[in-house]
């Protein structure tokens, strides 16, 4: 896949931090920005997939009431305490 050049504004303080980060890691700022963007995009894809999974659960009726959630948590707490004794 090819590369494209973009231009954007950045706060002076952020640029100073990025420049220091690049200097201390001995890496070009473009490489650091590319890595940060890739991580952000990966996180965003994962986040949106989790939301879609939750919405699908709701559509299919795979949901719990608040009371069921609390009861399950209490059951886990009791089991954990019993195992610790």
Image (spheres, helix red, strand yellow):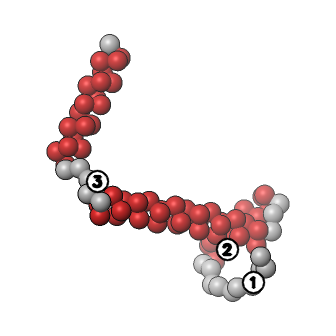
Q: Distance between the residues labelled 1 and 2?
A: 21 Å
Q: Quadrant of the N terminus?
A: bottom right
> Separation of disc 1 and disc 3 at Cα?
44 Å
Q: Is residue 28 above or below residue 25?
A: below
Asked whether 18 or 60 is in front, the reply is: 60
Q: How crowded is mark 3: few (under 14 residues within 10 Å), some or many (20 or more)?
A: few
Mark 2 residue crowding within 10 angstroms, few (<14) / some (14–19) / many (20+): few
Q: Mark 1 points at which residue?
A: 4
Quadrant assignment, res 61: bottom left
Above-or-below relation of 60 to 72: below
Q: Is residue 56 left or right of residue 41?
A: left
Q: Give left or right: position of 82 versus 22.
A: left
Q: Which of marks 3 and 1 precedes in the sequence?
A: 1
Q: Mark 2 points at which residue?
A: 15
Disc 1 + disc 2, Cβ < 8 Å: no
| Quadrant in which residue 85 is drawn | top left
Question: Where does the image place residue 21, in percent across and percent down from the top left?
Answer: 72, 62
Q: Looking at this view, is 34 or 73 the one in front?
A: 73
Are discs 3 and 2 less than 8 Å apart at CB? Answer: no
**x then y, percent, for residue 57:** 33, 58
Left/right placement of residue 82 relative to residue 34 reads left
Residue at (62% x, 80% y) in the render: 10
Disc 3, SS: loop
Q: In this view, does 84 lie above or below 26?
A: above
Q: Where is residue 60 in the image (x, y as percent from the top left)?
A: 30, 60
Question: Residue furthest toward the front?
Answer: 60
Of circles 1 and 3, which is in front? 3
The CA span between labels 3 and 2 is 47 Å
Residue 62, label in figure: 3
Task: Confirm whether residue 18 shows in the render.
Answer: no
């Amino acid at each position: 896949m090819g590369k494209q050049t973009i231009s954007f504004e950045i706060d002076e303080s952020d640029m100073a931090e990025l420049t220091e980060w690049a200097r201390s890691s001995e890496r070009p700022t473009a490489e650091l920005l590319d890595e940060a963007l890739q991580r952000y995009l990966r996180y965003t894809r994962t986040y949106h997939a989790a939301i879609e999974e939750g919405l699908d659960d709701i559509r299919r009726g795979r949901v719990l009431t608040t009371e069921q959630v609390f009861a399950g948590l209490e059951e886990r707490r009791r089991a954990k305490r019993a195992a610790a004794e």
